[in-house]
Image: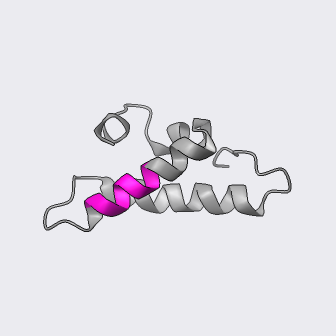
Amino acid sequence: MNRYLNDPRGPEEVLPSLTAEELANLLDALYQNLDTPEPEFGAEAWYEMAVEESCRRASSPDGAAHGVA
């Protein structure tokens, strides 16, 4: 998870490039991190954007990743 949080490209660029499995694993790791007394800095923003990416994929006819407009 830290490799994503520290990626200089940011969630707007990273999240659409992840496979469905990678996105699911990251969502799980972020959720678990947010459920701790001291979550990593930036984890909440990454989680919210990852949920948005997951929703975009679920609503897409082909389930493909889409960049942020």
In the image, residue 41 lies at what x, y percent? 22, 52
* Residue 28, percent from left and from top: 41, 57
Q: Residue furthest top?
A: 8
Looking at the rendering, which quadrant does residue 21 occupy? top right
Quadrant location of the N terminus in the rendered image: top left
Q: Residue at x 38, y 58 (%)?
A: 45
Q: Is residue 67 left or right of residue 28?
A: right
Residue 14 to residue 41: above or below = above
Q: Is residue 37 left or right of residue 1?
A: left
Q: Residue at x 67, y 49 (%)?
A: 69
The image's colour scheme reads one colour
Nearer to the camera, 43 or 12: 43
Task: Give the residue drawn at x 65%, y 63%.
Answer: 55
Q: Residue furthest right?
A: 61
Q: Which residues are magenta?
A: 26-33
**Could you tell me residue 37's position as x and y percent?**
13, 68
Camera-nearest residue between 57 and 29? 29
Q: Residue at image x 19%, y 65%?
A: 36
Residue 56: x, y in percent? 69, 58
Magenta includes 52? no
Magenta segment main secondary structure: helix
Q: How many marks?
A: 0
Horizontal side, residue 3 vs residue 19: left or right: left
